[in-house]
Image (cartoon, helix red, strand yellow):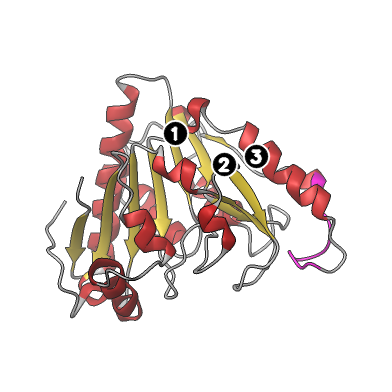
Amino acid sequence: MAPKVFAYSDSESVANSVGKYVVDLQNKALKGSSSFKIALSGGSLGKVLKKALIDNKDIGSNVQWEKWEVYFSDERLVPLNHPDSNYGLFNEMVLSNLPSGVARPKVHTINESLLTGKDGQVEGSDVTKDKEIAKEYEKSLPEGHKFDLILLGCGPDGHTCSLFPEHKLLHERSELISYISDSPKPPPRRITFTFPVLENSTAIAFVAEGAGKAPVLAQIFKDSTSKLPSKLVNEISSGTQISWFVDDNAVKGVDVGTSKY
């Protein structure tokens, strides 16, 4: 299936379309399952989800939080209350803003008791424990490592999850969750989904905003020689539906067809 690109003039419209899309996939998933299995990345996505699912009451009222199983497509090896934690961001933006009386989703986090070192730095860390964190998180994945939706960001360098350009983990096929100790973006120690998980998802959606994303989106959609991680995800041919939710600035000068969701 060819990727779909949904473009809007402002951030609020991007967020609202993401919210509608997420609710649609939730409803579709719950027709055949008792839970909606979604994975999230970090970065600016937390703010988008707050706008979409918390601030927009019309959309938020249709979210069946108690049936959500939330995972993280990558996580920094820091405590859950650390500023760099992807869970911490989701908790700050979404969980802590859910109205009282609303049932909470089931959220799968890393095992904090296995953390070593400080602030995700390599110094003083135990690689054996890092591997154990990754393996334990892998065991928590849904049956058949099948997600209904994986929501991702796209870095200016083309990275997504904690899969970075030219990194060996782009070729990892045996592990579903891998640890990384040499992330070029701090902190260096993380765990991340690998391509076998991404390829098995029903849907993947990227959210990318701002003029700073236009050069990398041009590579992703128009440079046939590019091996950027986000481009490799964009070209997944396993039947996964790939979508992009962007603002006009992110695709300015990019020769790609856009529509509205």
Mark 2 lies on residue:
176
Q: Residue at x 72, y 58 (%)?
A: 78
Residue type marked 3: Tyr
Residue at screen point 60% across, 38% down: 108
Badges 2 and 1: C-beta atoms under 8 Å apart?
Answer: no
How far from the left and from the top, in percent, is residue 152? 41, 55
Residue drawn where x is 56% and y is 65% of the image? 167
Magenta range: 114-122
Few, some or many residues within 10 Å of mark 3 (<14, 14–19, 20+): many
Q: Determine which quarter of the picture holds residue 207.
A: bottom left
User: Is 52 left or right of 123, judged from the image as shown?
Assistant: left
Task: For mark 3, give the secondary structure.
Answer: helix
Tag 1's secondary structure?
strand
Residue type pointed to by label 1: Lys
Give the CA distance from mark 1 to mark 3: 15 Å
Q: Residues within 10 Å of mark 2 (few under 14, many from 20)?
A: many
Measured as percent of width and height from the top left, residue 170 is found at 51, 57
Q: Is residue 85 left or right of residue 198?
A: right
Q: Is residue 20 magenta?
A: no
Q: Residue beneath label 1, please?
A: 37
Q: Nearer the viewer, mark 1 or mark 3?
A: 3
Query: Mark 1 Cα within 10 Å, few/some/many (few <14, many 20+)?
Result: many
Q: What whole-number distance in Å separates the C-alpha atoms at marks 2 and 1?
A: 16 Å
Above or below, 59 against 209 in this view is: above
Say how many tags the image has: 3
Residue type pointed to by label 2:
Leu
Q: Which residue is mark 3?
A: 137
Q: Give the structural element (helix, strand or loop) at label 2.
A: loop
